[in-house]
Image (cartoon, rainbow, N blue to C red):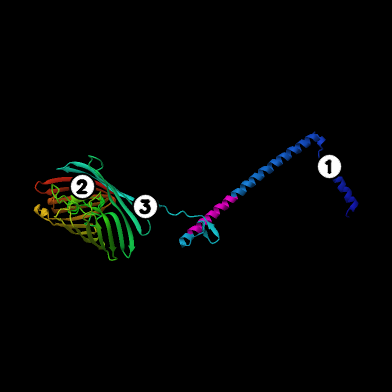
Amino acid sequence: MKPTKPLLFQIGLLAVAGIALMIPTPQAQGQTLEEIAAEMRSMKERISELETKLEVTESKLASAEAKAESAKQSADTAVQVASTASAGSIITDEKGVIVNGDIPLPVIPQEGWWNKTSIGGYGEMHLTLGDKEEIDFHRFVLFVDHQFDDRIRLVTELELEHSLAGDGKPGEVELEQAYVEMDLGSGYAARAGLFLLPVGIINEYHEPNTFFGTERNFVESEIIPTTWWEGGVGLTKRFDNGLSLDLSGHSGLDVDADGSNAFRIRGGRQKVAEASAGDWGSTLNAEYNGIPGFGIGGSIQYQSDLTQTTSPESNAAWMAETHIDVQMGGFGLSALYGHWDISGATPAALGLAEQSGFYIEPSYTFNTSIGDIGFFTRWSKLEAQKLDSNVYDVGMNYWPTENVVLKADYTRIDEAVDQDFINFGVGFQF
């Protein structure tokens, strides 16, 4: 039988009264009302302190989220700039700010001049034993080239010879190249300034790691006075089949008409240093390199007076040379013939109206695990002002790496007084 509602109500009152009797009163705990109030104040202060710390934490979290969003936007912008640049469609507003649609992008810095300037150089030291005993840091050269734009470039070359220059010193500081070249299109290029003449094999390209022998060959020292540069203008035409033609008008030689150096071609170089400009020279060069490993070419030069004087005698001069340079596998062959024809009674009387020379240089280079090792021999024949003789060279080059070379060779000069030399060299290019 279920209890009635009054009975249930009475039971509930008794339960509440029992629970109330079980809860301890402040008096039962031994606390006064003042102590309870102090405890409540302490709890409020603690809650306030926690709320303050929570606000600081929330502020830091919001700042970190903002920075993360900014970094994401910067990354997205960089991707947009890169993709827009690669598509070639970057647009700038009137303030120079790059925009892509409605999104402003940061300005991309343009390339500086340093990105269009290149530096290089080469150097070589020689040790000579035998009839001459000498050690000499023969030359140290620096190149500084600059590309002004897609068509115009500057080429410069500065050289220190024999390590030490100055009054009474053996060396010189020389400007070997300083010219501006412009591409004209259709294979044409024009240049103006101080430049190496395009004659022979090594006059334009004579870094020590590019030729055999410690010293440069005698023919391209006396007949072609390497290194030979002049000031003037030139025009080059390059064809797709490997043929190139070059025509230049430039300052000329100024040789002595008497004395021990009379009509010595090498002694006539003025090096564009307050040089006489009364009689200019003209040079025509042709080169063919259309077959890999095979090059052939030649040059013709004319000057109305080699002595640059106003005397009635005119010493007009023609120079002609032809050369071949072959490299097929390890086998190499270089050969050159050069000839000067000087008019006038004085050079004829001295036996110097005609000066000529040739050389033949076979070689073979082995590729090894420690670098390339090349062996060569060379026969040179000269009939010139300072040298009328046969010259024989034999030796080796060792390239531990492409742009560093060690050299050792023997030279014999057969003339009135025979001379023998043993040469050692180290050279580099960068």
At x 30% / y 58%, what residue is drawn?
Answer: 191
The region drawn magenta spans 65-82
Residue type beneath disc 2:
Ala
| Residue on which the image places disc 1 | 20
Q: Classify residue 7 as left or right of residue 248.
A: right
SS for dot 2: strand
Q: Nearer the viewer, residue 36 or 398?
A: 398
* Tag nearer the camera, 2 or 1: 2
User: Vertically, is 116 above or below 49?
Assistant: below
Q: Is residue 34 visible?
A: yes
According to the picture, the residue beneath numbered tag 2 turns out to be 408
Q: Looking at the image, how many numbered discs can be counted on the residues? A: 3
Q: Residue at x 55, y 52 (%)?
A: 71
Separation of residues labelled 2 and 3 (CA atoms): 36 Å
Q: Nearer the viewer, residue 230 or 59?
A: 230
Which amino acid does the dot numbered 3 rest on?
Thr
Nearer-the-camera pick, 226 or 334: 226
Which of the two discs, 2 and 3, sits closer to the camera?
A: 3
Judged by its main secondary structure, the magenta piece is helix
